[in-house]
């Protein structure tokens, strides 16, 4: 589902720009501060309603302006097209799909599945567990339609449970009245995440090999946020005193993590930054291929600041794979001369300068 048209207004230093986009690889080059990341941020706003740079989405509104808008047209796999529009102001977000207002942000994500790789992406391996939960949930969300509603139920029940735990007076029975529903939804989420990672693993292994990793075995093990020994229900009951003392539910999918290892050794313990980067790409390639296989959908890859963190040989391999595997890849770089010439020759080129984006001839 490539983006074919994009119209951006008032996102950071971009006052207004209209672009026609194509499938395949597009490179946006320009000096630092020209607005390259802002351009990807605009696309991300269109696909999620949020920014990948800040939790405070309103920060992307161009200084002195009241609202940001992004409009995009996408071609569908089966022919035909959809349009999406978002308007962000300081009080909220308005969304339209095919001109009709919608209230559910997840419609954006399912219409425009996006993957983002930035210079911070090694956080998927080295950062806190929330990065890895986001990774697995991205996949489960797109592959399993049930996940969204389970997740919303989980969030609601967790909030209620925590509110009860924080109360001065609490009868244990009152809490337990809620717990069977909570346990049921935790088990659903745990099963969905685990099944997703299991299904993803062979694809990850495939792309690791393709990217030159020689280790014997790669493993992603899901750590559900409670122990594996006994049921979640039992552990929740056993944890009552602690939960009450902490005024929060200590166990559950909101505490889950994934352990990535090669030949039994945690990847954080030994692979280099360059290899971590490649591993992250392998994981995203795997997610995209699995999404295509299961739902016939494709993600658009947004790649911010493609740089020479990788040696030329590996960078070449990677770029060939990305071009082959993704229907559309939008890449920003401050230094396109450092990229393999063949690759650049192949790509569509835009020049970004002071918030203006223009098509370049080769
Ligand atoms: N809300 C805003 N309004 C106007 N300009 C902004 C806003 N936020 C950031 N900027 C400016 O936008 C410019 C482009 O930033 P960025 O997209 O990060 O550039 P690049 O990725 O090309 O290095 C920066 O010079 C920054 O100061
Ligand atoms: Mg940038």
Image (cartoon, rainbow, N blue to C red):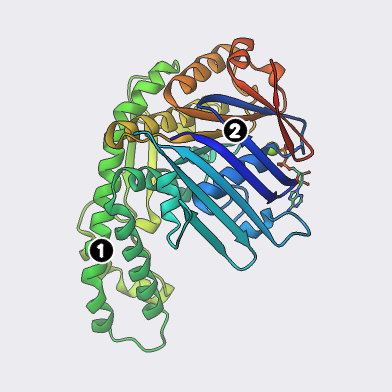
Q: Position of residue 175 (x, y in %)?
A: 28, 79
**Residue 235 has which mark?**
1
- Is residue 313 found left or right of 284 in the rendered image? right
Q: Give the residue at x 57% y 47%.
A: 71
According to the picture, the residue beneath numbered tag 2 turns out to be 20
Per the image, label 1 sits on a secondary structure element best described as helix
Quadrant position of the N terminus in the picture: top left
When the figure is inspected, residue 207 is found, relative to residue 244, above or below; the finding is: above
Q: Residue furthest bottom?
A: 169
Query: For the residues marked 1 and 2, what is the alpha-carbon distance in whole angstroms?
Result: 54 Å
Q: Position of residue 23 (x, y in %)?
A: 50, 27
Residue 263 visible: no
**Disc nearest the viewer among 1 and 2:** 2
Quadrant position of the C terminus in the picture: top right
- Is residue 153 found left or right of 266 in the rendered image? left
Residue 179 visible: yes
């Amino acid at each position: 589902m490539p983006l074919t048209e994009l119209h951006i207004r008032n996102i950071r230093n971009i006052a207004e720009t209209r672009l026609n986009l194509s499938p395949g690889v597009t490179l946006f080059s320009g000096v630092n501060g020209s607005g390259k990341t802002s351009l990807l941020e605009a696309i991300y706003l269109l696909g999620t309603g949020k920014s990948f740079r800040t939790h405070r989405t309103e920060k992307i509104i161009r200084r002195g302006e009241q609202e940001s808008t992004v409009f995009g047209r996408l071609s569908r796999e089966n022919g035909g097209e959809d349009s999406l529009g978002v308007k962000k102001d300081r009080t909220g977000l308005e969304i339209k799909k095919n001109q009709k207002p919608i209230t559910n942000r997840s419609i954006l994500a399912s219409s425009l599945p996006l993957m983002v790789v930035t210079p911070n992406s090694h956080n998927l391996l080295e950062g806190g567990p929330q990065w890895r939960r986001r990774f697995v949930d991205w996949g489960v969300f797109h592959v399993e339609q049930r996940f969204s509603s389970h997740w919303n139920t989980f969030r609601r029940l967790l909030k209620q449970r925590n509110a009860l735990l924080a109360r001065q007076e609490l009868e244990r029975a009152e809490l337990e009245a809620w717990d069977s529903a909570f346990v049921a939804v935790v088990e659903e989420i745990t099963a969905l995440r685990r099944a997703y990672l299991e299904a993803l693993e062979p694809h990850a292994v495939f792309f690791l090999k393709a990217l030159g990793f020689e280790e014997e075995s790669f493993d992603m093990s899901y750590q559900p946020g409670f122990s594996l020994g006994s049921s979640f229900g039992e552990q929740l009951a056993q944890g009552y005193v602690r939960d009450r003392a902490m005024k929060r539910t200590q166990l559950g999918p909101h505490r889950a993590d994934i352990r990535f290892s090669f030949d039994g050794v945690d990847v954080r313990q030994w692979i280099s930054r360059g290899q971590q980067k490649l591993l992250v790409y392998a994981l995203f390639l795997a997610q995209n291929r699995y999404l295509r296989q299961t739902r016939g959908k494709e993600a658009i890859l947004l790649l911010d600041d493609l740089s020479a963190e990788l040696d030329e040989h590996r960078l070449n391999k990677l770029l060939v794979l990305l071009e082959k595997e993704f229907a559309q890849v939008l890449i920003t770089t401050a230094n396109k001369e450092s990229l393999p010439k063949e690759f650049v020759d192949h790509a569509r080129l835009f020049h970004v300068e002071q918030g203006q984006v223009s098509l370049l001839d080769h």
